[in-house]
Image (cartoon, rainbow, N blue to C red):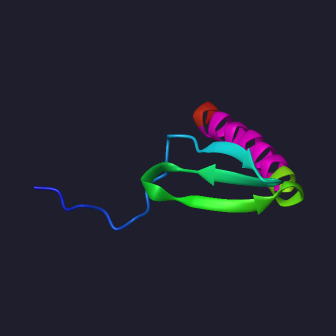
């Protein structure tokens, strides 16, 4: 019988962003929620896009070995 892992598991469901009263609301899985300024949301979005591209390239490099 295997024991459940205490390691955090990556989330595969995306969050949903919306705008309200000049703020960006991000609703994620499992009740995760954030409210960001427009600037913070834009910088977070760019950072996520860059990190996702890097993660994809790492995954591809790992599969090539």
Is residue 48 covered in magenta? Answer: yes
Q: Residue furthest front?
A: 21
Find residue 63 and report its horizontal and vertical position in percent: 58, 33
In the image, residue 42 above or below residue 33: above
Q: Which residues are magenta?
A: 44-62
Please report the residue visible at 40 percent of the width from the left and 64 percent of the height from the top.
Answer: 7
Q: Viewer-proximal residue, 18 or 1?
A: 18
For residue 43, what is the image quadrant? bottom right
In the rendered image, the residue lying farthest to the right is 39
Give the camera-side residue of 65 and 13.
13
The answer to whether residue 12 is left or right of residue 58 is left
The residue positioned farthest toward the left in the image shown: 1
The quarter in which the C terminus is drawn is top right
Residue placed at 64% from the left, 61% from the top? 34
User: In this rendering, would 30 be left or right of 23?
Assistant: left
Q: Is residue 22 magenta?
A: no
Left or right side of 49 for 65: left
**Depth check, front residue: 54 or 62:** 54
The residue located at (79%, 48%) in the rendering is: 45
Q: Position of residue 28 (x, y in %)?
A: 54, 50
**Is 55 situated left or right of 38 in this image?**
left
Q: Position of residue 37 (x, y in %)?
A: 82, 60
Question: What secondary structure do most residues of the magenta stretch adopt?
Answer: helix
Q: Is residue 56 above or below residue 9?
A: above
* Percent x, y of residue 5: 30, 62
Q: How many marks?
A: 0
Q: Quadrant of the N terminus?
A: bottom left
Residue at horizontal 19%, vertical 62%? Answer: 3
């Amino acid at each position: 019988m295997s024991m459940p892992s205490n390691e955090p598991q990556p989330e595969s469901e995306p969050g949903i962003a919306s705008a309200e009263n000049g703020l960006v609301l991000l609703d994620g899985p499992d009740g995760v929620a954030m409210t960001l300024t427009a600037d913070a949301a834009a910088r977070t979005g760019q950072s996520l896009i860059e990190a996702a591209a890097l993660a994809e390239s790492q995954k591809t490099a790992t599969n090539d070995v």
